[in-house]
Image (spheres, rainbow, N blue to C red):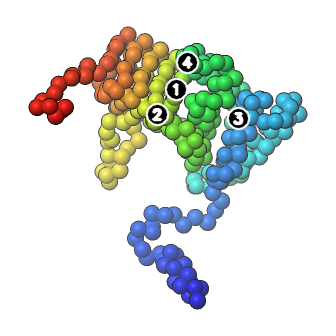
Amino acid sequence: MITPFLEKISQSLSEDTVYEYSFIPQLNHSLPNIHRIKELMDLIRIVIFPGFFDNAAVTTDTTISNLKFIYSLLNEQIYNGLCFSNDYNSPRKTAEEFTITFMDKLPGIKRLLAMDVKAVHDCDPAAKSHSEVIFCYPAIHALLHYRVAHELLLMQIPSVPRIISELAHSATGIEIHPGAQIGEYFSIDHGTGVVIGETCIIGNHVRLYQGVTLGAKGFVYDENGFPINLPRHPIIEDNVIIYSNSTVLGRITIGHDSIIGGNVWQVHDVPPHSRITQKKATAAFIDGLGI
C-alpha cells in the first residue's frame, strides 16, 4: 500500500536535524496571502481608475463599498505581515492604524499615477488616448503596484510590499523594488526586462525603455560576510532618457537633461546635459570568417 511510503516521506520532510532544512522557517502564525493581496490590488486599481476594470456603474456608493473591501483586505494582510516582526506589542491595533494611514494616501497615489499615464501617453506616438494607456500599457500596471508598495514600505510593513511588487513583476516583466524613490511624470516604454533597484533615486520627467537596468555594481560586507544595505543604486536626475538595454550600475549620478543611448554600460557619474552612446560598430572580415 502507498500509505506507509507516504508516511515515510512525511517523516523525512519533517526531520528537524537536516541542516539545510533550517533555512526554511517553521512558522506557527498567519502569513500574508498572495491571492488576497492580488484581490486587494485589483480593488485599488478599480478605485484609482474608476470605470476601467469593473462593470459596475461608478457611483459614490460603489466607491465606498470598494474602499471598505480595501480596508478589510489591507488590514488583514498588514496584520499578517506584522506577525513576522517582534517589534510590535499590539499588532492588531498597529495594523488598523497603518491601514488608516495608507487609506489617506490613496488620493495622492492617484495623482501620481495620473501623471504617469500622461507621461506614457506624451512619450509614445503609438498611444491613441489616455484610456488606451490605462487599459493596455504594462508600465501603468507596474507603477500602480510600485506606488502602493512604496507607501507601505515607508511604514515599515514587512513582506507585503515585496509581494505586491513581485505580482507586477510576474505580470509585466518590470521589476521595481518598493524602496526605490521615483518622482512624478515617470514613463517606461515597452518595459520588459526593466530593473530598478532598492536604493535608486529617480527624479521627475524620466523615461526608460525596455531592458534598462538601474543596479548595484558591488556590495559592502559586514564582519560576518553578509552584504550591508547601503545606497548602491544610481541617482537619475530630472529629464533623463535611458534607451533600451542600457545598464547603469553603482551609486553614480546621471545629471539632469541627459540621454543615455542604447546598450551602454555606465559605471561613472554623468554631468548634466550629457549624451552618452556606445562606440559605433566596426564592420571587419578576417579570412572570410566574418569575425
Q: Nearer the viewer, residue 16 or 239?
A: 239
Residue 14 visible here: yes
N-terminal of the pair, mark 2 or mark 3, is: 3
Residue found at x 67% / y 51%: 35
Q: Residue furthest top?
A: 273
On residue 45, the disc is 3
Q: Distance of mark 2 from mark 4, alpha carbons?
A: 17 Å
N-terminal of the pair, mark 1 or mark 2, is: 1
Amino acid on which the number 1 mark rests in the picture: Ile
Quadrant in the rendering for residue 154: top right
Q: How far across and how far down the image is residue 143, in percent?
A: 59, 31
N-terminal of the pair, mark 3 or mark 1, is: 3
N-terminal of the pair, mark 3 or mark 4, is: 3
Q: Where does label 2 land, which residue?
A: 194
Nearest to viewer (mark 2 / mark 4)? 4
Q: Do the residues under discs 3 and 4 have CB atoms within 8 angstroms?
A: no
Q: Distance of mark 1 from mark 2, alpha carbons?
A: 8 Å
Amino acid on which the number 2 mark rests in the picture: Val
Q: Do the residues under discs 3 and 1 have CB atoms within 8 angstroms?
A: no
Q: Distance of mark 2 from mark 3, alpha carbons?
A: 22 Å
N-terminal of the pair, mark 2 or mark 4, is: 4
Q: Where does label 4 land, which residue?
A: 124
Q: Distance of mark 3 from mark 4, alpha carbons?
A: 23 Å
Q: Quadrant of the C terminus?
A: top left
Nearest to viewer (mark 3 / mark 1)? 1
Q: Do the residues under discs 1 and 2 have CB atoms within 8 angstroms?
A: yes
